[in-house]
Amino acid sequence: MHIVLAILGILGGGLFWWYRLKVLGDAASDAIDSAGRVRGYFRRRKIRLQAEHSPLTAIEDPVLAAATVIFAIIAEDILITEGHFDAVRSVLIDISNPRKADEAMIYAKWAFIQIGDTPTVIEKTSPFLRQRLNDLEKNELIDMVGVAAAAVPVSHHYGQRVRKLKQRLGLQVD
């Protein structure tokens, strides 16, 4: 009888400690999940503050920056039509995939509408583009602006904006 009681005691003690370890494991898992949520909150807060400050400072992709600059230059003081979207999208497809070009166009339109001022768009995005693009890519960006502008009617400020973009990118101004 004492052997059965010893076995039941050992079994009961094992079950007790197994349950305690399970509860501790669940508590540790909850703590890790909470830490991940806090970390995510701070990341989202940082992005939200950047976007609230300016949609242009949240840009971290050269394709997105290029789309925003091109769209701002060709859509300045002009009624925006589907032709503007198609013109910018067609030049973006040459440097990225169609899905990324569509996303870039959506963001470019939203950012330009939020800012509403082409010189500001050029001022805010050109340091990023100057840093991320080499000289060949900078010249290709200027060519892309020209191709997109040829497809739609543009403002009388077009030449001035292209010269300013060239200057801000560190290229030779004509």
Image (cartoon, grey):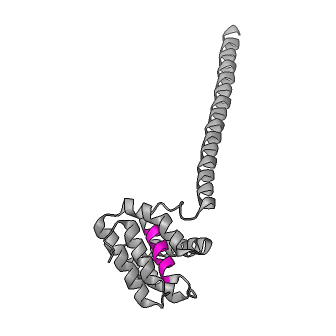
Residue 156 versus residue 71: which sits nearer the camera? 156
Residue farthest along the top direction in this orientation:
2
The answer to whether 72 is drawn above or below residue 150 in the figure is above
Residue farthest along the left direction in this orientation:
136
The quarter of the rendered structure image containing the N terminus is top right
The residue at the point 34 percent across, 79 percent down is 143
Residue 5 lies, in percent from the top left, at 70, 13
Quarter of image, res 95:
bottom left
Residue 123 is covered by the magenta coloring: no
The answer to whether 46 is drawn above or below residue 159 in the figure is above
Residue 91 lies, in percent from the top left, at 39, 80
Residue 101 versus residue 53: which sits nearer the camera? 53
The residue at the point 45 percent across, 85 percent down is 87
Residue 63 versus residue 143: which sits nearer the camera? 143
One can see residue 129 in this view: yes
Residue 155 versus residue 21: which sits nearer the camera? 155
Residue 45 lies, in percent from the top left, at 63, 51
The residue at the point 54 percent across, 64 percent down is 56
Q: Is residue 79 left or right of residue 140?
A: right
The answer to whether 81 is drawn above or below residue 137 in the figure is below
Q: Bounds of the magenta span?
A: 63-74
Badge count = 0
The residue at the point 48 percent across, 88 percent down is 154
Secondary structure mainly formed by the magenta segment:
helix
One can see residue 96 in this view: no
Q: Is residue 73 left or right of residue 173?
A: right
Quarter of image, res 174:
bottom left
